[in-house]
Amino acid sequence: LAEKDICILKSIAREVYSVTNPLLGTAESGRTVGLGFGEDETSFIDNVAEKAILNYLIQNKISCIFVGEEGGVQKLGEKPSFYLVTDAVDGTTNAIRGLRFASTSLAISLANDLGSVEAAVVMDLADGGIYEASRGEGAYYNSVKIKTSNTAVLDKAVLSVDVSRAPNSVNKIIPLVKAAKSVRSLGSAALEICQVASGRLDAFVDVRSRLRMIDIAAAMLIVKEAGGVILQPNGASFSNYPLTELNRFSVIASANKKIHNRIVSHILKL
Amino acid sequence: LAEKDICILKSIAREVYSVTNPLLGTAESGRTVGLGFGEDETSFIDNVAEKAILNYLIQNKISCIFVGEEGGVQKLGEKPSFYLVTDAVDGTTNAIRGLRFASTSLAISLANDLGSVEAAVVMDLADGGIYEASRGEGAYYNSVKIKTSNTAVLDKAVLSVDVSRAPNSVNKIIPLVKAAKSVRSLGSAALEICQVASGRLDAFVDVRSRLRMIDIAAAMLIVKEAGGVILQPNGASFSNYPLTELNRFSVIASANKKIHNRIVSHILKL
């Protein structure tokens, strides 16, 4: 079953790549076409990408509960056997600007629970690289097994943080930013969490209370299967959140428990 | 002359690409091999890249004053007719980690002055993309003319900032980070300034007083030729700094004068 799930997710990701890659950095890509799930503006490139996913599902007669940025929750076909949680383009601002760091995020869950994701694919839309995981079977980048880093101290850590469009979140992470070796901010949460999974980053930190389950569902499984830790800043997991409801989260994804604890202790509770 | 200069710089960049691209993200790339110009640690990938430049110059009997991260200032050949200012790998941490945002930075100047650069090439070491400029002849990305964005207000601006390894710089840019639409931190100053040149970013801000002329010499000409503004936070230009001396700078590279003034007004003088 898991292999079949991953196969479908990869096929969908390739469809998204083929329609979005030529649009990266074009003026057309950024045209606003509506408001999505959670009232984020959706742009032409988001719209095209989500349509590519829906078309694939319909043409291949795949029955599921679809959860997407623009279309929200939709029942497809007669006998849906799983939930498909998608962020067709994660990192839309980058994609529109032509900054080559954006992804498509796809997760399959058998239950209506963010903690129950079974299979996940995140594809880099700039180069087609594929991060994937099935529950209990490890995580892979372009078919090579990946694992998180052993970095245990902040002054050797390369961290990614996101403080965009959330002025109130900036002060919370100042001690963390000052303590880290290097700070990055790359602009696609799903792909940044996958960089933690592959050991390229030591952690991804977003304390804005803005990320939706569609942003993190796939990357969450990938980083866990690679040996990482992904929790809310208060230590809560992401179980027991229905995939069909809109919730917004703060997220800390870390390479290991040691660095995770150090990160948490450097975030101010404001 | 300018065309010949650019041709040499591109040939050198291709040499650097061919030896560094296979090393990106490998354990070997990060081995410390010494201290460079300005006492920054140099890693194996820096060493290999700078050697590739020097080998090219020697093999092609090009006489110049070479300025490099590891080797410092060297006279090559008998009758040097120009200064070649290089940062063989800009974004070494990214290159070692496998984060796909690093560059090689190459500039030719006829005089010993940072403000006199005549020809510049910055190559993206992940994909081989080439940013280039000759004084008075515009800037190009992969042979297509580029220009900076028209973004004039911060709440529509995508800015890149660097605060790594400089805790004292963090507080200075808090008002700016809070006012911007999106904040990025990508980890290669030369390549980030080129993103400003191509309109992908609206500004690059580094108030750490850490950048060396080898980091900015090439990108400075490219962003100016693309219509941008590059100055120190106090409004000073980069003229009248000898290429053969080590100075460290804070740098603000902006798409246009309007956004530049808004950025400067949001930086605290601490």
Image (tube, coloured by chain):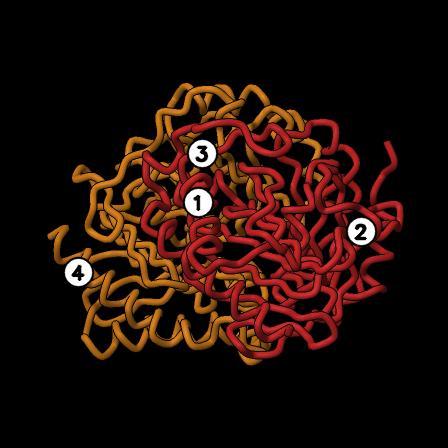
Chain colours: A red, B orange
**Distance of label 2 from label 4 (alpha carbons):** 54 Å
**Local crowd at mark 4 within 10 Å, few (<14), some, or many (≥20)?**
some
Residues at marks 3 and 1 touching, judged by CB atoms closer than 8 Å: no
Residue that numbered label 4 is attached to = B7
For residue B39, above or below residue B61 = above
**Distance of label 3 from label 1 (alpha carbons):** 12 Å
Q: Residue at x 57, y 56 (%)?
A: A63
On screen, residue A224 versus residue B92, left or right, reads: right
Q: Secondary structure at mark 2?
A: loop
Which mark, by number, is residue A238?
A: 2
Sequence-first disc among 2 and 3: 3
> Do discs 3 and 1 share a chain?
yes
Sequence-first disc among 3 and 1: 3
> Do discs 3 and 4 share a chain?
no
Q: Secondary structure at mark 4?
A: helix
Q: Secondary structure at mark 3?
A: strand
Residues at marks 2 and 4 touching, judged by CB atoms closer than 8 Å: no
**Local crowd at mark 2 within 10 Å, few (<14), some, or many (≥20)?**
many
Q: Position of residue A178 (x, y in %)?
A: 74, 45
Which mark, by number, is residue A232?
A: none
Which mark, by number, is residue A51?
A: 1
Front position among marks 1 and 4: 1
Q: Amino acid at mark 3?
A: Ser
**Distance of label 1 from label 2 (alpha carbons):** 28 Å
Q: Amino acid at mark 2?
A: Phe
Which mark, by number, is residue A43?
A: 3
Q: Nearer the viewer, residue A5 or B254?
A: A5
